Amino acid sequence: MDFALTDEQQEIRRAARDHLERRYPASRVCALAECPGGSEAGAWPELTRQGWLDDDLGMVELTLLAEESGRCLHPTPWWTTVALAAPYLRAAGEPLSLPATVADGAPEGAAPTGAGTVHATRSRQGWLLTGQVPAVPQAGAVRCVVVRAHTDEGPAVFACDTGSTGLVVQELSTLDTLRRMARLRWDDTPARLLVEPADTPRVARLARLRGGVLLAAEAVGVAAGALEMAVAHARLREQFGRPIGSFQAVAHQLTDAYVDTESARSLAYRAAWLVGDEASPAGAQAVDEAVLVARGAAVRTCETAVQVTGGMGVTWEFPLHRWLRRALWLEAFPGFGDDPHDRVAERLLRPDDPGEFTPTTPEGR
């Protein structure tokens, strides 16, 4: 079985990298991080022209784009739109014509950090939303908010524009200023129904799987970007007349980070492959494993990169801290329900589980 990327997928990766490197060098990304909203306004039409929002992109193609986005800290709301909001919008037949995010006002089970309570009531004019969610990613940089809200028939999914009457968006002070959080409050805010209560669990499950894959992919990209900066520094910085990368103490750290990143990449693409095949029962497990490994790899690799770059790595002027901030943001992001640690541990410790790893493919081979 051939696991290599197709020629078309390799071209997607190459085109995405060329575009992001040209438009968003580290200096540009750091400048945007200091601007209000931390995101580039006006980038959406170009993303649309380049096909980043096309309906026919599969999970592997989206994973390629998410990885490249993480590598350069792509400063637009593309990730929140595609990873969080797209399944709900497309379930309603709506295009991804506006940057969007998701606010969870009707969490399942124990409410994760960042969830709130939003109620939807039907009026003669349509649906109205009331409630608040304390932490919504990039709400200050998008134009559409997808909201899970309580109704009399159960949780349903709605959408409203950020300029709608009664919606208050209050940006919060956050660690990653390129992906800021905001507190949202609705007070009889008009909204349109996207997903009926009967369909919400099915669409929400798909959203969790897709979002988990793209979170893992972005984490892989963050790790790769930080590692590239550390390796470049280790090749140029000399000590005792030699590049510091020639010393085993440095080389071994970079090698461990490389292995960490490649392991996370393999799990992320395995998860993308399985989730892309909707008939596979192994998708949820693969996503949990990918998220756990990729988030950890991103944090560890960024911390290693800071160590390798030494005093320069902890200065405000050197861009590496932006990658560390994103890694910590991804590690803390609660947007997919229960902690995957719990689910993975439950599977590993199940009494009837022999504890052996069985490779899974969409065909069951």
Image: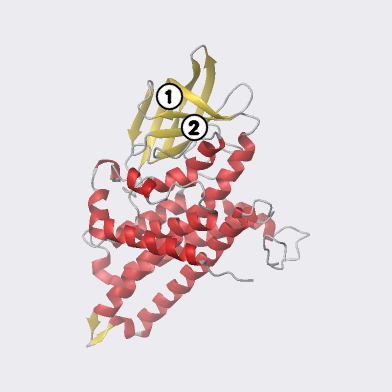
Left or right for 92, reference 138: right
Look at the numbered discs 1 and 2 and tell me whether their residues touch, using CB distance below 8 Å: yes
- In the image, residue 20 above or below residue 167: below
Q: Position of residue 179 (x, y in %)?
A: 36, 46
In the depicted view, which residue is nearer to us: 15 or 351?
Answer: 15
User: Mark 1 belongs to which amino acid?
Assistant: Trp
- Tell me the CA gap for discs 1 and 2: 10 Å
The mark nearer the N terminus, 1 or 2, is 2
> Which SS class for mark 1?
strand
Residue at left offset 35%, top offset 53%: 74
| Residue that label 1 marks | 186
x and y percent of residue 111 in the render?
A: 55, 37
Q: How is the structure coloured here? A: secondary structure
Asked if one can make out residue 98 in the rendered structure from this viewpoint, the answer is: yes
For residue 235, what is the image quadrant?
bottom left
Q: Please, what secondary structure does the residue beneath circle 2 have?
A: strand
Residue 334: % across, % down: 49, 45
- Nearest to the eye among marks 1 and 2: give it: 2
Q: In the depicted view, which residue is nearer to us: 109 or 288?
A: 288
Residue 299 in view, yes or no: no
Name the amino acid, label 2.
Val
Q: Which mark is residue 147?
A: 2
